[in-house]
Image (cartoon, rainbow, N blue to C red):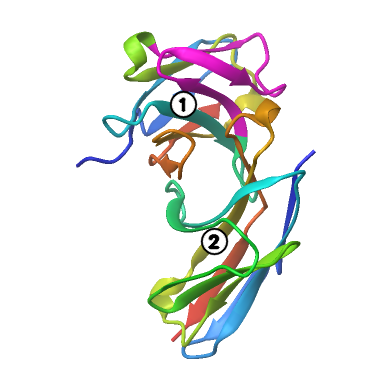
Amino acid sequence: DTGVSQNPRHKITKRGQNVTFRCDPISEHNRLYWYRQTLGQGPEFLTYFQNEAQLEKSRLLSDRFSAERPKGSFSTLEIQRTEQGDSAMYLCASSPMGDTQYFGPGTRLTVL
Amino acid sequence: EDQVTQSPEALRLQEGESSSLNCSYTVSGLRGLFWYRQDPGKGPEFLFTLYSAGEEKEKERLKATLTKKESFLHITAPKPEDSATYLCAVQDGEETSGSRLTFGEGTQLTVNP
């Protein structure tokens, strides 16, 4: 499978715990994006990387959120001290330079 | 700030009953308008990119069109397997916006056999 992959697909955690999600983009795509989607809404932009550089962060990305893309390959999104409001689908997408973004299957986070 | 509004929120069709979905947008400089299909519990699946007013793209029973203010996704003779949420997104050409996509809330399409 040469598409975008995300792990885990589902995560249930207790409020206050830290969680980390992984995204593996389509090989040779130098741009990688993170979005968040709640039920009945469209995806909302969180942040994006060009190679290993994080070029833009949304105001939605509070200090509890951090993303990395070491060596410009896979990316991780960490949420510290999770809150119930963090419950959502976290989507990763990749693209060649500025072109069409292809999405992964998402990670569904439930914070109890 | 970029804005995307999709209508209707939900649409029920009988198999074979053609219809259109609307996407109205406000953007300072359109770099691209994108249509995606999303099935429950899955990530969005790319359908089309439109770049300039007057452009049209087709794929099987779907046809997307673009004007300076809105885009339409026309569905001809739909089948039950076309049931999904259809998302519209815009990409702003301004330097400061990077290449983020701004999405609408989607139209949930149900096609009954």
Count the marks.
2
In front of the other: A42 or B36: B36
Q: Quadrant of the N terminus of chain B?
A: top right
In front of the other: B87 or A64: B87
In the rendered image, the residue lying farthest to the left is A1
Please determine whether, in this image, residue A104 is positioned above or below residue A16: below
Q: Position of residue B57 (x, y in %)?
A: 48, 69
Residue A46 is covered by the magenta coloring: yes
Please determine whether, in this image, residue B17 is positioned above or below residue A24: below
Q: Nearer the viewer, mark 1 or mark 2?
A: 2
- The secondary structure that dominates the magenta segment is strand
Residue count near mark 1 (Cα–Cα under 10 Å), binned few <14, some 14–19, many ≥20: few
Residue drawn at the location 65% of the way across and 64% of the way down:
B53
Residue drawn at the location 46% of the way across and 21% of the way down:
A50
Give the left or right position of residue A62, taking residue A92 as reference.
right
Question: Which residue, given by chain and number where applicable, does mark 1 sit on?
Answer: A12
Please determine whether, in this image, residue A22 is positioned above or below residue A107: above
In front of the other: B27 or A2: B27
The reply to whether residue A93 is in sight is yes
Question: Which residue, given by chain and number where applicable, does mark 2 sit on?
Answer: B85
- What is the magenta range? A45-69
In front of the other: B64 or A103: B64
Residue A77 is covered by the magenta coloring: no
Q: Amino acid at mark 2?
A: Thr
Residue drawn at the location 62% of the way across and 10% of the way down:
A64
**How much space separates mark 1 and mark 2, taking CA atoms?**
25 Å
Q: Position of residue A56 (x, y in %)?
A: 61, 20
Q: Position of residue A9 (x, y in %)?
A: 37, 34
Q: Circle 1 marks a residue in which chain?
A: A
The answer to which image quadrant residue A6 occupies is: top left
